[in-house]
Image (cartoon, grey):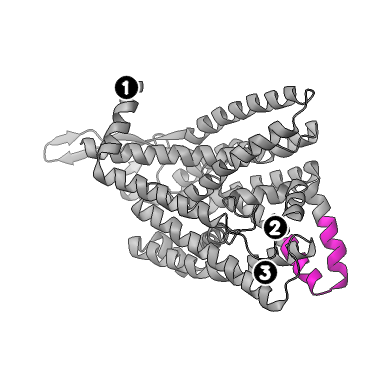
Amino acid sequence: MLNSFIRKIKLALSDPQIRFRILFLVGALAVFRLLASVPIPGVDRAALAAFFSNNQFFGLLNIFSGGGLSSLSVVMLGVGPYITASIIMQLGTIIFPQVKQAYFEEGEAGRAKFIAWSRLLTIPIAIAQAVGFLFLLESQGVIVHLGTVAFITNIILVAAGSMLLMWLGELVTEFGIGNGVSLIILAGILASVPSSISQALFTATAASIPTYLVFVALALLMIYAVVVVSDAERSIPIAYARAVRGAAMSQGAATYLPIRLLQAGVIPIIFALSLLLLPQMVLSMLGAAHISFAASAALWYTALLSNPWQYGSVYFILVVLFTYFYTAVTFEPHRVAENLQKTGAFVPGVRPGRETEEYIGNVVNRITFPGACFLGFIAVSPSIIQGLTGVTTIVLGGTALLIAVQVALDLANKIDAQVSLREY
C-alpha cells in the first residue's frame, strides 16, 4: 500500500497538468495568507488579543474566516458571506419555483445561473456583516474611533476582501484541485495550529500537562471518528426489471442507493453559527445608534455566548435542527423515487411510487438522527472540555477537526481521481 501511495505521488508530480493544478492551488493559498496578514486601519492589538481570548464564539468564527478575523485583516470575513449566500439560495429552492427550476431542472446552464445569483447576493451580505463586525469591535475598543470616512473605508476594504476571496476560491475550483472555498478555510485552520500550540506550551504548567495529554488523545480519537463517520453510508438495494429482447430474457442488473450518514456535511454548523452571530450584529448596530435597550441586551447576549455550557447547549440544538432541515432541503425522496421508477428500477420488496418514497424518507430520517447528534457533539466538544477543565487554550476544536478532515479527504480523493485518469 505504501509503494502504491509513493507511486501515485511520483505520477502526480511528473504529470504536467496535475503539477500545474497543484502549483496553482499552492500559489492561490499563498496569496490568501498574504492578504490575511494585512490589517485594516485602527486596530488595537492588545484589545484584540484580549477580546478573542475571552470569547470562544468569535474564535470559532475565526475558523470560517480562514484565520483573517483574528488579525482583523482585509479578508477578516473570509468566505463567510459567500457561504451564507449559497445557503440562502439553497433555501430559496423551497420558497421560489424559479430558483428550484434553475438548480434542479436546467442542468449546467441552471447551475451557472444559480452560482451567478449567489455571487450577487454575496455583495449585500458582505457589506452588512462588515458593518455589524466593525460596529461591534469599535464598541469593544478593539478598533479605535476613526471617524465616518475611515469607517466607510474599512467597510469597503472588508467587503472587497471577502469578494476577492470568493473569486480566488472559484479560480482554485476551476484551475486547481478540490473545492476552493473549503481549501481556503482549511488553510486558515492549518495556519493557526503553530501559534495555538506555542501558546498552549507557553501557558502550560506541571499540573496542566496531564490535561493537555488527555486532550491530544481525544483529538486523535475525534480525527478517527470523523474519518469513519464521513465515509459511513446506508446502502439501499436497487434492482432493475428484467429486459425482454425477442425470445431472450436478460436478468436485470442490481446496484444500491448510498445514503450518507453526514448527508448535510458541515453546512448545519455554518448555518448555526450564522444564526448565533445575527443577534449580536443587530444589537451592536442598534447600540451604536444609541437605542436604549440594545446595550443591555448586547451585554446579556455576549455573556450567554461566553458561558461554555449555555452556548454549547444552544449550539448543539441548532446544529441538530439544521441538519434535519438541510437534509430535507437537499435530499428529496419524492424525486429519487420518481427517477427510480422512470428508469425501471425498484427497491426489492417495496412497491414503486409512493411506497418507495416513504421507505427512502424513513431511512433518511433514521440515519440523520445519529449523524446530527455526532455533528452536534463534534461542534460543542470544545465547550464541554472548557467547561470541565477550564482550559481555554484548545489547539484545535471539534468543528475545525471536522472541516479539516473532510476537506483533506476530499482533496486526497480528487488528486487520486486525477492520477487514476492519467493511468488509464
Residue 153: name its quadrant. Answer: bottom right
Q: In which quarter of the image is the N terminus?
A: top left
Query: What's the residue type where badge 2 is placed?
Result: Leu
Residue under circle 2? 277
Left or right: residue 15 versus residue 351 is left
Residue 131 marker: 3
Query: What's the residue type where badge 1 is placed?
Result: Asn
Left or right: residue 256 versus residue 63 is left
Q: Give the range drawn in magenta.
A: 279-301
Q: Tell me, yes or no, if residue 281 can be seen here.
A: yes
- The percent position of residue 410, horizontal first and vertical second, equals 43, 40
Front residue of this view, candidates 151 and 285: 151
Residue under circle 1? 3
Q: Tell me, yes or no, if residue 1 can be seen here.
A: no
As helix, strand or loop, the secondary structure at mark 2 comes to helix
Query: What's the residue type where badge 3 is placed?
Result: Val
